[in-house]
Image (spheres, helix red, strand yellow):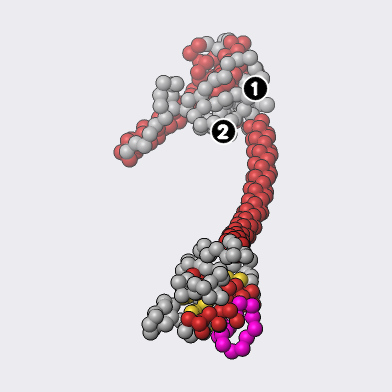
Amino acid sequence: MEPFVQTEVYQLGNGGDMIFERDLHALSEFLGRSPPAFYGGQVNDQPGGQLQWVIMADLPGKPESPMFGRIQFSLRENNWADGLTRAMQEALARLCGQNAMALQGGRFAHLARHNSLGVPLNLPFHPVLRHHVDHLDFMLCETRTALDNSRGLTNYAYLQMIQKDETIKVIAKERRTLRRENAKKDYTIHRLKAKIAAMKETIKTQEDQLQVFEGEGEGESVQGDGYSYVSNDNEEDEDLDFYPYGDDTMEPPGRASQDAMMQLLQTLMADRGAERAERQANIAALQQISQNNQGHGNHDHPGSKLKNFQNTNPPVFSKTEEPLDADDWLQTMENNLEVAGVEANDKVLFATHYQQDQHVPGGLVPAH
């Protein structure tokens, strides 16, 4: 409740003519009390913001004999005039209730009486009105109590309505927020789906390009592990695995020490030197055979067999990454050596002559 701020004052005995004012002033003089005073002020403590008047009544006591206690109370009304009238009627009733013994047999004996809490008291029997006055006072008190309760219930209901409106506003705001968040989520999901579709399309394009690259590489798999060969040819033969490090039971070499690597390189260089020396010896032998054949004209001499072998146009072996190419070359050379009637001891010598990286004398190079 907001603090009471006094804005109005009404003092009895100034010649006013409000209802109950004359009787209250006359009773105060009869009892020898000072005139009552009433104070009023507006407060704004209602849910709807309506201003209400709080009326405070002050009936001073009497310090000398006979002594009377001070009477104070307050009440509420919608305006100053109604509140002041009600306060005067209540002050008159409480003053009569406090001084009931002093009022017996006088003109104030049958006025309404209230105790210090404002509750009606029974009146003495009236020869004409009987108990009609106190009955009316009880009814008036109950009506005022009901009116005050109704005012309180109305204020409470109005406060509930305000809280309900505030709750509806909060819920509506949260609903709008949820809708915006759901819209953002839907947009994010749509955007992610579009990205996923684009990524799938990119992956499909790259897979198609990968297949084209593999087709152009004649069976070489660009997705392989680097240790195996897989043929792409449409053949019914089983795929062959090519192990560059020996048989299929061997594992690729790991990280060897520097000494082991140097020893391996020295071994490879020594093997290369031995192969080169052997090829030079074979070339010299073929040259000697050719010269002997030209000097003696003997067709059964190995030189004639070399000539016959050259006439079969044997293919020259070149470096290849296809194991099947080497096998095909060996099969062709075997057939050509058989047709030329070359002895078994000379087959290796003649075949070595048709390797592409070997130096071949001009007289022995076959025409292609």
Q: Give the image location of residue 327, x and y in percent.
A: 56, 19
Q: Can you see residue 104?
A: yes
Does 303 appear above or below 29? above
Residue 97 in magenta?
no
Residue closest to the eye, 183 or 324? 183
Q: Residue at x 67, y 46 (%)?
A: 186
Q: Which residue is mark 2?
A: 223
- Whether tag 1 and tag 2 are in contact, CB under 8 A, the answer is no
- Dot 1 or dot 2, earlier in sequence: 2
Q: Say left or right for 272 vs 242.
A: left
Bin the neighbour count of mark 1 within 10 Å (Cα to Cα): few under 14, some 14-19, many 20 and up: few
Residue at the extreme bottom: 14
Task: Say what secondary structure mark 1 lies in.
Answer: loop
Q: What distance separates the C-alpha of mark 1 from that of mark 2?
A: 17 Å
Q: In the image, what residue type sits under mark 1?
A: Asp
Q: Residue at x 68, y 26 (%)?
A: 368
Task: Say what secondary structure mark 2 lies in.
Answer: loop
Bin the neighbour count of mark 2 within 10 Å (Cα to Cα): few under 14, some 14-19, many 20 and up: few
Q: Residue at x 51, y 31 (%)?
A: 225
Q: Give the image location of residue 348, x and y in percent.
A: 50, 18
Q: Residue at x 63, y 71 (%)?
A: 78
Residue closest to the eye, 368 or 292? 368
Q: Which circle, 1 or 2, is nearer the viewer?
A: 2
Q: Say left or right for 275 vs 151.
A: left
Residue closest to the eye, 265 or 91? 91
Q: Say left or right for 103 vs 149.
A: left
Residue at the extreme front: 127
Does 366 appear above or below 335? below
Magenta residues (range): 7-21
Q: Give the image location of residue 191, x and y in percent.
A: 67, 47
Q: Which residue is mark 1?
A: 233
